[in-house]
Image (spheres, rainbow, N blue to C red):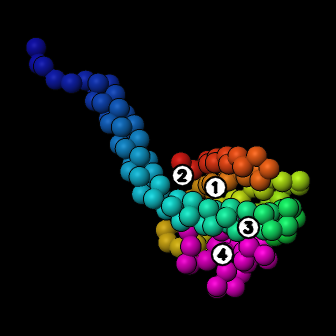
Amino acid sequence: MKKAFTLLELMIVIIILGVLVSSGVMQYQASFEKPRGAEARQILGQLRSACATIFMDTGSIANCTPENLHIGTDTDMIPSSCRSTHYFSYTIIVALPNNVVFVANRCTSGGKSPDVSTARNLRLQVNYTTGEDTWTTNGGY
């Protein structure tokens, strides 16, 4: 009697190896993507501080606008759309009376290389009355 692997056993081993390799590749890609989130955390922190200054000066966040926070399309501004100098584009959502949400959207095209294939973002919600910050992400940043 010959001792050998059957075709079914070989197929099962190949499937298991394929699953292990694909999960390893995803973890490998995630390990490179996470440090890119440092750009977003740093810029969202700058925006939070700038809006806090406006809030302390005026008692309101109504003036926490993209224009006042230097978010726009000019090269010396924080990018509101993807461009080759940044991994993220940035937006602000003002919810009166004292809540602001700063959003960093990972570029899927037109951003600093490499772009990602799936849209991801990092959000910082700030309540300037209570001083509470809430960070949320759908990209592992």
Q: Amino acid type of disc 2?
A: Tyr
Local secondary structure at mark 1: strand
**Residue beneath disc 1:** 121
Q: Is residue 6 visible?
A: yes
Q: Residues within 10 Å of mark 2 (few under 14, many from 20)?
A: some
**Residue beneath disc 2:** 141
**Residue beneath disc 3:** 53
- Going from N to C along the chain, the mark reached first, 4 or 1, is 4
Q: Amino acid type of disc 1?
A: Asn
Per the image, is 129 magenta? no
Local secondary structure at mark 3: helix
Q: Amino acid type of disc 3?
A: Thr
Q: Residues within 10 Å of mark 3 (few under 14, many from 20)?
A: some
Q: Position of residue 128 (x, y in %)?
A: 77, 53
Q: Position of residue 119 (x, y in %)?
A: 63, 56
Instruction: Kindly report the distance in space between the C-alpha atoms of the residues bearing marks 4 and 1.
Output: 16 Å
Most extreme residue toward the top, as rendered? 1
- Tag 2–tag 1 contact (CB < 8 Å): no
Q: Give me the residue at 34% from left, 28% from top.
A: 12
> Which sits in the foreground, 62 or 1?
62
Tell me the tag on residue 78: 4
